[in-house]
Image (spheres, rainbow, N blue to C red):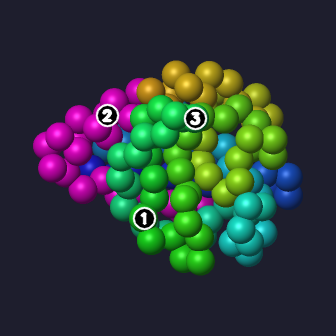
Amino acid sequence: MDIHLHRTYFKESTNGALFIHDSFFGFCIELPWLNNHRNVSCIPEGTYILKPRYSQKFGHHLILENVKNRTLILIHPANDALKELKGCIAPVTCLSGIGKGTSSKNLLNKLVSKCYQAFDRNEVIRLIIQS
């Protein structure tokens, strides 16, 4: 299964739109592009494999594999990129500003459900990030 993230870059943060099977799924917020610097930048555009992950802090969520010069890049809930993200990606139901959105947990739960069903079918899930 391919998930496409189409980004729009701003000085303050990055907004994006998620598409699954060429259908709009929701939005994403991220940190601004600052040359892939750890904890302050979104990750480079490219194709990444998603895997399931669980933590007490976020519950069930997703992790990206093989991000150049970065580790623990997650897809987890957040509604304000600058306050809640350190390089990760947060799905949001609606955008409320640059790097800000609403109802992140709701959209994350839908995304995780869709991905975990694909994992159960032994599908590879690719996140394709582009502008």
Residue 24 % position (x, y): 45, 36
Q: Earlier in the sequence, mark 1 or mark 2?
A: 1
Residue 115 at least partly seen: yes
Q: What residue lies at 71% left-to-right and 54% top-to-bottom?
A: 86
- Viewer-nearest of discs 1 and 3: 3
Residue hosting label 3: 57
The circle on residue 90 is none
Residue 92 % position (x, y): 60, 32
- Kindly report the distance in space between the C-alpha atoms of the residues bearing marks 1 and 3: 20 Å
Between 70 and 95, the one lying in front of the other is 70
Query: What residue span does the magenta drawing correspond to?
Result: 110-131
Q: What residue lies at 67% left-to-right and 43% top-to-bottom?
A: 29
What amino acid is found at the position of numbered circle 3 in the picture? Answer: Lys
Neighbor class of circle 2 (other Cα within 10 Å; few <14, some 14-19, many 20+) is few
Q: Are marks 2 and 3 in contact (CB under 8 Å)?
A: no
- Viewer-nearest of discs 2 and 3: 3
Q: Earlier in the sequence, mark 2 or mark 3?
A: 3
Residue hosting label 1: 65
Instruction: Find numbered disc 1 in the image and state the secondary structure of the residue it sits on.
Output: loop
What amino acid is found at the position of numbered circle 2 in the picture? Answer: Lys
Q: Is residue 83 above or below residue 41?
A: above
Q: What residue lies at 45% left-to-right and 53% top-to-bottom?
A: 63
Between 1 and 60, the one lying in front of the other is 60
Q: Any magenta on residue 75?
A: no
- Kindly report the distance in space between the C-alpha atoms of the residues bearing marks 2 and 3: 21 Å
What amino acid is found at the position of numbered circle 1 in the picture? Answer: Glu
Which quarter of the figure has residue 77? top right
Position of the C terminus, as image quadrant, is bottom right
Residue 119 % position (x, y): 23, 45
The circle on residue 114 is 2
Q: Earlier in the sequence, mark 1 or mark 3?
A: 3
- Viewer-nearest of discs 1 and 2: 1
